[in-house]
Amino acid sequence: MNIATNKIICVVGTRPEAIKMAPVIQGLQTQSWADVRILATAQHRHLLDQVLNLFNIAPDIDLNIMRSNQTLTALTARLLLELENVLYIEKPAAVLVQGDTTTVMAVALACFYQDIPIGHVEAGLRTRDMRNPFPEEANRVITGKLAHWHFVPTECSRQNLLHEGIADEKIFITGNTVIDALLTVAAQDIALPIPVAPDKRLVLITAHRRENFGEPLRNICQAIRTLAQNNPEVVFLYPVHPNPNVQDTVNGLLADRPNIILSSPLNYVHFVSAIKRSYLILTDSGGIQEEAPALGKPVLVLRNETERSEAIEHGVAKLVGTQYEQIIAATQLLLDDHTAYQSMVKGISPYGDGHAAQRIIAVMREYFS
Ligand code: UD1
Ligand code: UDP
């Protein structure tokens, strides 16, 4: 195959990929040796565009793949067909992907078919339970088998890959690029666009995982409803993910409480200001489990398993699952018990120092020299 010598394609598909890839893209764009091309699959449309605009990133290629309520099969099939074509035309020397979405898995497979080396940013995260989170654990395992460079955030992720037989010389501990993005954005003093009285405590909530659709998400919402009733002086802010499965349940169960604010997804600067303003966070998101400790906020994780075990081990996050009673008990404890609250506010940030992108770029620079 005819390869353009230093062409690196950076792929983004969803909101978290764009946030976490932005520092790598911006860093690579300053390197004279690198011919950087940005490929947006647009598995997300509005959520992705929000982030790309914020970081001033303009895709060179946009597959515009999102459809309303897309199934995993249709999404994967469309991605593979479109990617085959793009890779055949572009002939990159390397491709960088980030995280564990269907975009990442499909790009890894499409590159494998055309023998193009893949760099996996945020490699090595594992729960070792293929259905939790679904389908992300499978996406990571498949991408891990196919990648040439594994950029892991922590020693724990390195160990996960070694355990799967990945050669040590292909693994690079870099930290998570989300901390690079977060520290840049958090340094700006941007006001929360939703007014919350200064004397009110704010509980920030997000939940969107596919394995939580149906009963688990209904339990989460019922628990939030009860917490809001029992704590009228606390404000509960829930920016709701646009996935219709999430919208229908959340709007159906939480729309009519005076101290629950349901908003559209916040753009990243506003979401970071919401984290900074919050007292505690309830979430099933991956990225927020990394960001909250970096900003000293306790996180209650609305999942039965997490691949971000470092935050749990340091006591700055707690796995509370999706049962009504457990969510209420864990949240009420942090609202009522100052000692319990303080024990989770330690200023420990296990996922990086804000220089992950530089380390990734250094590895790529060495390869291309
Ligand atoms: C996807 C990822 C998940 C990641 C999450 C981050 C997969 C299978 N899932 O989940 O790993 O944690 O993104 O947010 O890769 N939608 C819009 N506008 C948008 C984005 C989504 O309307 O900008 C709606 C569409 O109806 C879309 C649906 O949400 O069909 C689901 O989007 P999809 O990318 O399939 O999965 P997510 O649940 O967003
Ligand atoms: N986020 C955002 N606006 C929101 C909710 C989340 O900008 O309304 C950011 C959040 O700070 C984190 C990322 O989006 O960086 C996480 O995305 P999401 O929870 O959708 O995906 P996951 O991390 O679970 O894959």
Image (cartoon, rainbow, N blue to C red):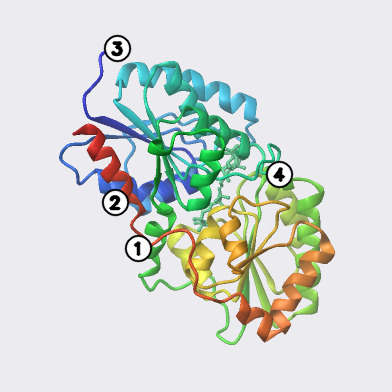
- Kind of residue indicated by mark 1: Thr
The image quarter containing residue 190 is bottom left
Quadrant location, ligand no. 1: top right
Does the closest atom of ligand 1 sit within 8 Å of the Cβ of label 4? yes
Q: Is residue 289 in view?
A: yes
Secondary structure at badge 2 equals helix
Which of the labelled discs sits on residue 358, or is there none?
A: 2
Q: Nearer the viewer, mark 1 or mark 4?
A: 1
Q: Nearer the viewer, mark 3 or mark 4?
A: 3
Circles 1, 4 touching at the beta carbon (< 8 Å)? no
What residue did someone put label 1 on?
184
The quarter of the image holding the N terminus is top left
| Lower position in the chain sequence, tag 3 or tag 2 | 3
Secondary structure at badge 1 equals helix
Which of the labelled discs sits on residue 1, or is there none?
A: 3
Residue at point 74% right, 80% down?
A: 232
Circles 4, 2 touching at the beta carbon (< 8 Å)? no
Circles 3, 4 touching at the beta carbon (< 8 Å)? no
What residue did someone put label 4 on?
245
Q: Nearer the viewer, mark 1 or mark 2?
A: 2
Circles 3, 2 touching at the beta carbon (< 8 Å)? no
| Lower position in the chain sequence, tag 1 or tag 4 | 1
- Kind of residue indicated by mark 3: Met
Q: How many angstroms separate mark 3 from mark 4 (CA)?
A: 43 Å
